[in-house]
Image (spheres, rainbow, N blue to C red):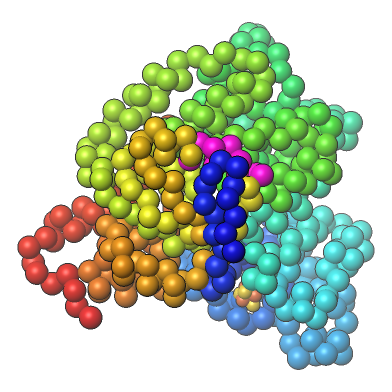
Amino acid sequence: MTTTAPNALNVECETGNYHTFCPISCVAWLYQKIEDSFFLVIGTKTCGYFLQNAMGVMIFAEPRYAMAELEEGDISAQLNDYEELKRLCLQIKRDRNPSVIVWIGTCTTEIIKMDLEGLAPKLEAEIGIPIVVARANGLDYAFTQGEDTVLAAMAARCPTPTAVTNTEERNPIQRLLNFGKKKEEVQAEASQYHDHPPLVLFGSLPDPVVTQLTLELKKQGIQVSGWLPSKRYTELPVVDEGYYVAGVNPFLSRTATTLMRRRKCNLINAPFPIGPDGTRAWVEALCTTFGIEPQGLAEREAQTWEKLADYLELVRGKSVFFMGDNLLEISLARFLIRCGMRVHEIGIPYMDKRYQAAELNLLSQTCAAMDHPLPTIVEKPDNYNQLQRIKALQPDLVITGMAHANPLEARGMSTKWSVEFTFAQIHGFGNARDILELVTRPLRRNQALAGLGWQQLV
Ligand code: SF4
């Protein structure tokens, strides 16, 4: 089925027969981000094997996650779900004493219809620890969408202003920025911000990137009231009707919907701060919403591009094919087109045209500016078909999962493993270089090994 979007981008939909990480993988980065959390994945050995392997060395660091492995007795309802979960959660409370336990529902809990949402409030009241339920299963979602389901569930737990006594206390990033300053200095600084309604950003990013983006907005006089998620569950940001919210990642559409519908917030639809072009457009969109004239952004973007000159030399004119598995594809493709690359196809697991509207617009504009034909977006791609297209097109670089990387390399194709983009720091002006570092790595290696004469080894 082919539909033509209003911005004339061609969006196709295939069979959904593609490789990606199961969304339960989000526990790997979320337990690290939310320091006082514990993630309990309620599933089978299949889920356990996946996590154990996907998380690599992290599993030897006593992670704050565990599997509640279902047995035959659970499936046939001979054991009592409530009692089993209570036993495990009490053990977690005793051993780790977390501020929140996140239950991750899996394929099995869906199929046997285990009522996690119904059990959680009862158990929460009994054991005295908040229990957040996220149904991040492979039946419904792909990879990074796991974070989306967790954050959507957490958005419902953000306190209202009336529920907290000291709102400053709830804003750890502001506390960090004010660290070591006298009261008068803090007050003087507060007056440098424009008078605008509270702004909460959502999306889990490493702490250094959170600081960078917060400071980027501070330069424009925009104050960030909080981040969802914060470093600790007990510091979830205050959210109230009329607050403004903006996403930092393209896969957070459910969180955005929850914040809009359930918490009555206003969503700022902006491209995502990936690449200098995206970061500038993101900051500009926030400024425009609050009626602020952006200061020095054009120069800031130009300086960043200048610093990338050596890498741009390497990528210019090269072609790239995104097989699609983590939902960052539109933003990355838009950035790479701006870098002078040619994009054959943008595969993507799920395309929310409303949440990504501004990003899609920027993609079309970038194509027009760079004289690049509008690339085809393939939602729910079919990896088998894609391999036939790759064979025909012979792109200079294929961005793909580990399942196809080595087989493609052996056929003389350069590949970049897509999962690295989700773990590397890629947001903001300062991290644009890191994206190109990743993209150019196979190209640089090819240069270094050129002339050895053994590219095709199948
Ligand atoms: S796809 Fe389903 S069964 Fe497989 S690891 Fe994910 S949740 Fe578990």
Q: Residue at x 31, y 63 (%)?
A: 393
Q: Residue at x 68, y 67 (%)?
A: 140
Q: The magenta stretch spans which residues?
A: 354-363
* Residue 355 is covered by the magenta coloring: yes
Query: Is residue 174 shown above or below 24?
Result: above
Front-lying residue, 267 or 22 = 267
Label the magenta part by its dominant secondary structure. helix
* Residue 5 is covered by the magenta coloring: no
Query: As drawn, is 12 to the left or to the right of 238?
Result: left
Q: Position of residue 199 (x, y in %)?
A: 70, 28
Tally of marks: 0
Front-lying residue, 70 or 235 = 70
Q: Position of residue 117 (x, y in %)?
A: 85, 64
> Which quadrant is home to the N terminus?
bottom right
> Which quadrant is home to the C terminus?
bottom left
Q: Position of residue 211 (x, y in %)?
A: 53, 32
Name the image quarter holding residue 134: bottom right
Q: Residue at x 83, y 75 (%)?
A: 114
Q: Position of residue 207 (x, y in %)?
A: 54, 40
Query: Is residue 120 shown above or below 108?
Result: above
Query: As drawn, is 423 to the left or to the right of 320?
Result: right
Name the image quarter holding residue 144: bottom right
Q: Residue at x 67, y 49 (%)?
A: 253
Query: Is residue 344 shown above or below 66?
Result: above
